[in-house]
Image (cartoon, rainbow, N blue to C red):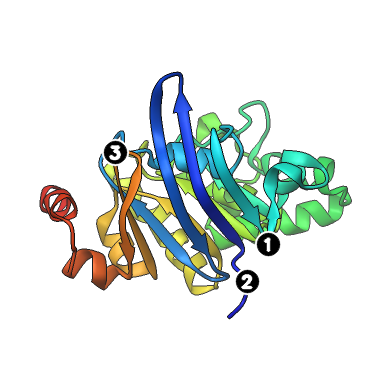
Amino acid sequence: MSEPILEVRHLSKSFGKHEVLTDVDFSVEKGDVTCIIGASGSGKSTLLRCVNLLETPSGGDILFRGQDIRKMKGGAPAYRQKVGMVFQSFNLFYNMNVLKNCTVGPRKILGVSKAEAEETAVKYLTKVGMAPYVKARPRQLSGGQKQRVAIARALCMHPDVLLFDEPTSALDPEMVGEVLSVMRDLAKDGMTMLVVTHEMAFAREVANKVVYMNRGVILEEGSPDDIFNHPVHQETKDFLARVR
């Protein structure tokens, strides 16, 4: 069995006296699509922000290919080259057009040439259906289009893992499908993905692992069939009854 790409061990996170995450353990293998589900306030997004070092864990360890991410050479920026993140609020640069949004990271951080960065950007913008908009500014795009650009931008860094923090929650309902379609295609291509989502149909159909969080702990995890058709805990059953 291959070594996991990501391992989360006994992770805890507190804000003051309020403990948001308690003894969280799970691992991500190459090619996994892991969906983290649970009610609002259960700690899902905080967990993802800890995995990307946007929040500093209060305790426990996060390992990337066996190495403590807080001790990696180059620090958090070097780690984030390998573990990209797509945010619910897009986080695009509004003073740059679509093409430059996708080339600025590879040029400044990876040191690639302008021509190579633009070639890669067009490749991934084509993949997400946004190549016709290379000269557009984010303010000219719909929410679904912005999120597809954000996904292309993350792919331009050639990450080993992509983190998605509720990528459809800021979208109008008619735009959700276009973003989920891109994510389905990434899963088919073998992209390793860790996805915090309220989209139960996506978790059921696309994930190979589902993690259910409740009050800062992982209450149960397993295959989509395990979680959706054979949940063990009453809290899981109650949550699924509400969201189905």
Label 1 – label 2 distance at C-alpha: 7 Å
- Which amino acid type is shown beneath numbered disc 2? Glu
Question: Residue 167, image x and y in percent?
Answer: 42, 45
Residue topped by disc 1: 65
Towards the viewer: 39 or 181:
39
Q: Are marks 3 and 2 in contact (CB under 8 Å)?
A: no
Q: Residue at x 59, y 42 (%)?
A: 52
- For marks 3 and 2 on the same chain, the one whose residue lies earlier in the sequence: 2
- Labels 1 & 3 near each other (Cβ < 8 A): no
Question: Is residue 207 something one can see in this rendering?
Answer: no
Residue 122 lies in what quarter of the image?
A: bottom right
The residue at which mark 3 appears reads as 215
The type of residue carrying mark 1 is Arg
Question: Which sits earlier in the primary sequence, circle 1 or circle 2?
Answer: 2
Residue 197 in view (yes/no): yes
Q: Is residue 82 left or right of residue 216?
A: right
Q: Pointer 1: residues within 10 angstroms few (<14), some, or many (20+)?
A: few
- Residue wearing tag 2: 3
Give residue 2's position: percent from left, percent from top.
Answer: 61, 77
